Image (cartoon, rainbow, N blue to C red):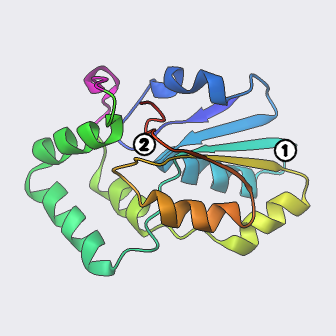
Amino acid sequence: MNYFSGFALKGEEKFFREYTIDSDLCMVGFSYGAQKAFEYVYSSPKRIDRLILLSPAFFQNHRKSFIRTQLRYFKADQESYIKQFLENVSYPSNINLYEYLDIGKYEELESLLSYVWDREKILELIDRGVTIEVFIGGEDRIVDSEKSFEFFSEITTTYLLKDFGHLLRV
């Protein structure tokens, strides 16, 4: 299995073992890493059978002013931004994510917030034989889980974990 980490994180894949499959033909991505995993699979000439998207970063339902505000806050006080971000990622659990911290860059955050999931590209992957599974926490404080579920559930196998947060924990 190849794993793509979330924004400002490294080594957090241990939290997702029950959602993944140990296979060289499987790609897994968490949050920002879900975007990266998707693009990797889409562009790869290699055989990939399964793509697992864990709490995919989904912001295309937000106004541009939201994105500008997030970027401005990050630029003004990166330490406070990351502290709040990690708290929101771990909510509702009390898991301390600081040991997994890998300070994110402004350009990565901008990419994460501006990314648009392309329905046609997803359908193309499915037509190529890639099974796509999406896991979304119903109590996610990073993305709007309802909008995310609405988008992905129309075209992929999507699981909404009612009381779980972005880290897919209670």
Answer left or right for 169 relative to 159. Answer: left
Q: Nearer the viewer, residue 151 or 33?
A: 151
Q: Residue at x 82, y 34 (%)?
A: 25
Question: In percent of the image, x 45 and y 23: which residue is there?
Answer: 11
Residue 151: percent from left, percent from top: 61, 68
Judging by the rendered image, the residue that carries numbered circle 2 is 166
Q: Position of residue 156 (x, y in %)?
A: 74, 57
Return the residue found at the far front. Answer: 162
Q: Quadrant of residue 113?
A: bottom left
111 and 62: which is toward the camera: 62
Q: Which residue is mark 1?
A: 46
Instruction: Please state which amino acid type lies under the numbered disc 1.
Output: Lys
Mark 1: few/some/many CA within 10 Å (<14, 14-19, 20+): few
Segment tinted magenta in the rendering:
94-103
Helix or strand or loop: what does disc 1 sit on?
A: loop
Residue positioned 46% across, 72% down in the render: 60
Quick check: 163 left or right of 119?
Answer: left
As measured in the structure, the alpha-carbon distance from the residue carrying label 1 to the one carrying label 2 is 30 Å
Q: Earlier in the sequence, mark 1 or mark 2?
A: 1
- Magenta segment, principal secondary structure? loop
Residue 126, quarter of picture: bottom right
